[in-house]
Image: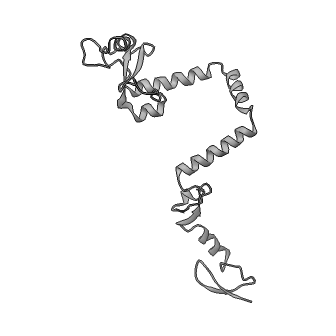
Amino acid sequence: MPIITCLHCGKEVEAKRVTKKYCSELCASRARSVFPKERTCVECGKVFKVETRGDAARRNCSQRCAKRRNSKKSKKWMDDHPGAMKRYNRNRTDKNPSAWNEANANIRVEILNLLGGKCVVCDVTNRFWLHIDYVPTTRGKPHRHPRHLKYIREHASDFRLLCANHHYELTLTGKIEGTDITQ
């Protein structure tokens, strides 16, 4: 019988197979749980280290690779199931006809709270009267700024809340009378 050296504890033992790597199942189990481990990213092929047990199932080297891989999988699934999202959305609205309106209203309330919840000029708090104003104007630029919650969270200082009257006054005249707010 060949003699092998256990890769975990270093003990030399007789083995029935030449390909055996560990002296016992306990050593094999302990060797599998040792960190850091090296893995190969399934998206880009780069070798990376898994440092903790919490990351033991990690298969991508970075969040960018994970997103790229996930978007490829999602696109493939959507191509394989062309009507699935239409069915899903139809079922969702059949169960709750105002589902989209409620979701958008909740996001709007969150944005309004994030920006202070009142007009910066007159302190009006009625959420139906408040407009979200983008401070650095988009005049002369080819695209409007993103208006989704994540962008507003990351760039909150670029936005302010104005009541409808003050927003229209700013839009029409380029300034709000009695304040230093200009467009």
**Quarter of the rendering occupied by the C terminus:** top left
**On screen, residue 140 above or below 13:** above
Q: Position of residue 161 (x, y in %)?
A: 37, 21
**On screen, residue 51 above or below 169:** below
Q: Residue at x 62, y 49 (%)?
A: 69
Q: Position of residue 62 (x, y in %)?
A: 53, 53
Q: Residue at x 75, y 37 (%)?
A: 81
**On screen, residue 117 above or below 80:** above
Q: Residue at x 60, y 60 (%)?
A: 45
Q: Residue at x 72, y 83 (%)?
A: 18
Depth order, front residue of 139/117: 139
**On screen, residue 132 above or below 63:** above
107 left or right of 29? Answer: left
75 left or right of 61? Answer: right
Q: Position of residue 55 (x, y in %)?
A: 55, 57
Q: Quadrant of residue 38?
A: bottom right
Depth order, front residue of 83/128: 83
Q: Position of residue 159 (x, y in %)?
A: 37, 26
Depth order, front residue of 151/29: 151
